[in-house]
Image (cartoon, coloured by chain):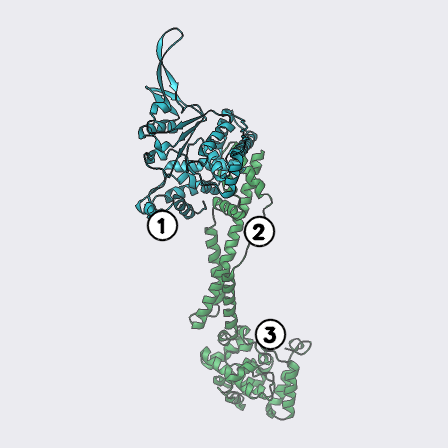
Amino acid sequence: MMQTPADIEAQAAVFREVFDHLRGEIGRVFVGQRSLVDHLLLCFFCQGHALIEGAPGLGKTVLVRTLGEALNLSFSRIQCTPDLMPADVTGTNLLAETAQGVREFSFRRGPLFANVVLADEINRATPRTQAAFLEALQERHVTVFGITHPIEEPFAVFATQNPIEMEGTYPLPEAQLDRFFFKLTVETPSAADLAEILTRTTGSGTVRVAARHGAATVRAMTEIVKQVAVSEPALDRVLRIIRATHPSAEEAPPVVRKYVQYGASPRAAQAMILAGKALALLDGRYHVAAEDVARVALPALNHRIIRNFHGEMEQVSTAAIVEGIVAAAGGRA
Amino acid sequence: MTTRDAHTSDVLGIVATARRRVRTVATLRLIAVAAPAGVTAGAALVLAGWAPAETPPVLGVLGAIAAAAWAAAHTPSRAAVARMIDARLGLRDRVAAAVQLHATGGPIAALVTRDAASRLASIRMREVFPLALGRAHAAAIAVAAASIAWLASGPIASSGPAAPAGSATSETAGGESSARATTRSQATSANSAGRSSVSTDAPQRQEPHAGNRPGNAAREAFAPTGTTTAPQQLQPPATTTPGASVNASGPAGRAAAAPAVASASGRMGRGGAGAGEIARGAVTAGAGGASPGSALASAPGADAAPAATVSYRAARTSAESALARDVIPPDYRDHVRAYFRALPASTTGPGGTR
């Protein structure tokens, strides 16, 4: 059915309303970190997966669970450990007896079959199990015993990892990192935020999140996001940013030439454009501006820029590199 | 026409207006640099003696034409102008997106176009692209103006083309160079200045040249041998227009006849002496304007002569005083009287001020 401008406007209004609702509900449970919450929601409405990195106890799990609850979506949590097997994640065939007394294999869905999946400490799972996530992340379906089982939309995996305990972990390979739409970092809360956290969590009261909308609304929102146009200046900015991440490129700034080994893939450009579309809708526009893509450059490039030996030895942060890249491309991160 | 078409038309119209405005501003800014640069370069060429006096304005006009052509050839595209509007108004690529999507269909394009049209509705392109000349432009114009002024007050004035009367004398003078003519002009001026007891209104800035040729030229030119034609030539020539007279130091304008006197006497080598003689007769006509050969007073080039204003009445009073004191030789007294009587009322002005 052909949509009219009025239809688009109505859907955009709903999108803004849903976004604000989620902000508010998450804000009731997760204190502060507005930028982190916004990026998480952008990622979700673009139907991307996010890698959330932060020290233990900063509320990563609460953040993701609240997102699922506020949208009345199915939520599952996978605590990754070295002995976690792929079948534990994807599901497996079980021999069962039917009502007619016939024994046959039936597929028992794993925790991946949910709208919102939290893969906690994904870097503690073995590479074999991590690989089991690959198909689900990219293809949005699971294949078991030669049978493909699609995962219902909306589907988003939010994986967390702890940056300070690296012993006994299996760092995600670059190919798998690239499948994450954003990499978000949870910062240590400020003193005021910490005081607010203590006030909220040490009392007798409990916060109940108001669940609204649902999977259908989210699917409609993801469709309206995709319809947003991309202006030529925005496209130019994305191209320049991506080109500037490669140390061998002519557009690469000195910080990239010095500290970067590998630049960003086309998936990074896709992520920036899609997130820019969602940002444009939030801003009441129906086209992506160059500023939009610059605003989401850091979470989109954070995990896609591989530092070289000098960068790691001098502990140059990826954020600093991305800042230099965006500045070289004519914007501000 | 649908609403969307109207919005599209509005946006494209505004962008087209902005494009014209950008081109106009660029053209004027370039002209503000190129024309003064041409004038300045022309002035430099003239000063170096490599080009005629008309070169500065010609080069200025050529510079302006070249600037306009360059600006027209480098007019930014519609998309580029749309980006400029977005950047200057902080519209977050609204106009660029509208221009980009105007040809495509769909509800999103309609919304983008409508959004851009609403944002541009109250925008005046004169405010977005103001015509503001910077310091560089002002400096270029100032340099060019200074060049013109300096040329007008100095070398060009002395070496300008000869007037009709002067043309005749130039022939007589045997094609003397303008440099010599300048020197003679200064000599004549010096002569006048040297007799400043009579000619009090002579331009003071000519005094430094007083020692160059101390009046001999004037005396020689007024020798009786040349006097047969001198009286006729001393009549106010038809070429002595008021404007020329003003530029030629007042009485000097009327002294334009003096070179002709010299030519008649065959002593144009000391041309201008006739004027000097008049100056001696307290008419002050010998001041600069009595330049020989070049006949600045009545020449087109006299427009560039040093400006000086001399009171007609003062000159006449001085002449009468000179006549009363027998300073003027008897043979010339009638000519002096006839000269002043012959001056038309229009040239003396209502107050007698020239």
User: Circle 3 sits in a helix, a strand or a loop, which is it?
Assistant: loop
Q: CA distance from mark 1 to mark 3?
A: 74 Å
In the image, is residue A255 above or below residue B155?
Answer: above
**Residue B210 coordinates in the image, percent (x, y):** 51, 86
Do tag 2 and tag 1 residues touch (Cβ < 8 Å)? no
Amino acid type assigned to the residue bearing label 3 in the image: Thr
Pointer 2 residue: B127
Q: Please give the chain letter of the residue carrying mark 3.
A: B
User: Of label 3 and label 2, which has the lower sequence position?
Assistant: 2
Packing grade of label 2 (10 A; few <14, some 14-19, many >=20) is few
Packing grade of label 3 (10 A; few <14, some 14-19, many >=20) is some
In the image, is residue B241 above or below residue A301?
Answer: below
Which of the numbered marks, if any, corresponds to residue A254? 1
**Residue A257 visible somewhere in the drawing:** no
Pointer 3 residue: B241
In the image, is residue B264 above or below residue B238?
Answer: below
Residue at (37% x, 43% y) in the render: A243
Rendered shade, chain A: cyan
- Furthest toward the top, the residue is A100
Q: Please give the chain letter of the residue carrying mark 2.
A: B
User: Circle 1 sits in a helix, a strand or a loop, which is it?
Assistant: helix
The chain assigned the colour green in the figure is B
